[in-house]
Image (spheres, rainbow, N blue to C red):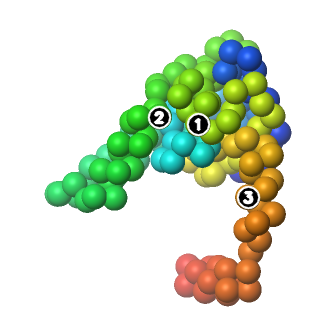
Amino acid sequence: MFRGNHPAKVDEKGRLKLPSAFKALVDAATVTQFYVTSPDGNSAQIWPLPEWERREAQLGESSEMDEAVQKYLSFTSYYGHQVGMDQQARILLPQILRSEAKLDDQEAVVIGMGNYVEVHNRKAFEDKMAANRLTAEDRTRLAELTRRKS
């Protein structure tokens, strides 16, 4: 499970060095291939390829292609690219996605999201966090969800 925030930088060639905490998880699972994509172009998602394949299978299980699934697959295919990790633990982010998410040669935050990692432009992410604080309603909803699952 990928967790936490790890500051990073996307280099001039569009490569992101995977934070050591995340690299250790990838190494333990012997993952060598990744699917780098985005559902909206605002950030990059780095999925270990086996996790991405599970997600595709889940989405494909419905007997008819739901419009939301079609949109999601269109976006993730448009921005998506299968890549390997080099010897320095760097992953190449696709040019179209780097441009759209403003990740070219920029400081970034790398956020663990459980099965995958999100990469955000640091400034844009901090602005979004400041504008979207947890509300009392959010906290109540979270409390209800956790009570239901225990």
N-term-proximal mark, 2 vs 1: 2
Q: Nearer the viewer, residue 30 or 58?
A: 58
Q: CA distance from mark 2 to mark 1?
A: 9 Å
Residue 90 position in % (x across, y down):
68, 21
Q: Quadrant of residue 149?
A: bottom right
| Rendered residue at 63%/23% (across/down) | 91
- Say which quarter of the image contains residue 105: top right
Q: Which residue is mark 1?
A: 100
Name the residue rendered at 67%, 86% in the picture.
137
Which three-letter amino acid code belongs to the residue tagged 3?
Answer: Lys
The residue that appears at 39% across and 36% down in the rendered structure is 77
Q: Are marks 2 and 1 in contact (CB under 8 Å)?
A: yes
- Residue 55 placement, left or right of 98: left
> Distance of mark 1 from mark 3, alpha carbons?
16 Å
- Residue 12 locus on image (x, y percent): 74, 17
- Could you say whether the residue bearing mark 1 is in a helix, strand or loop? helix
Please rate how many residues cluster around mark 2, counting C-alpha atoms within 10 Å: few if below 14, some from 14 to 19, many from 20: many
| Outermost residue to the top | 87
Number of numbered discs on residues:
3
Of mark 1 and mark 3, the one earlier in the sequence is 1
Q: Is residue 27 visible?
A: yes
Q: Tag 1: residue type?
A: Glu
**In screen coordinates, is 62 left or right of 85?**
left
Q: Position of residue 45 (x, y in %)?
A: 57, 41
Number of other residues with Cα within 10 Å of mark 1, as a class: few under 14, some 14 to 19, many 20 or more? some
The disc, 2 or 3, on the residue closer to the chain's N-terminal end is: 2
28 vs 73, nearest the viewer: 73
Q: Which residue is mark 2?
A: 79
Image mark for residue 128? 3
| Tag in front: 2 or 1 | 1
For the point 41% across and 35% down, the residue is: 78
Give the distance between the C-alpha atoms of the residues marked 2 and 3, in whole angstroms: 22 Å
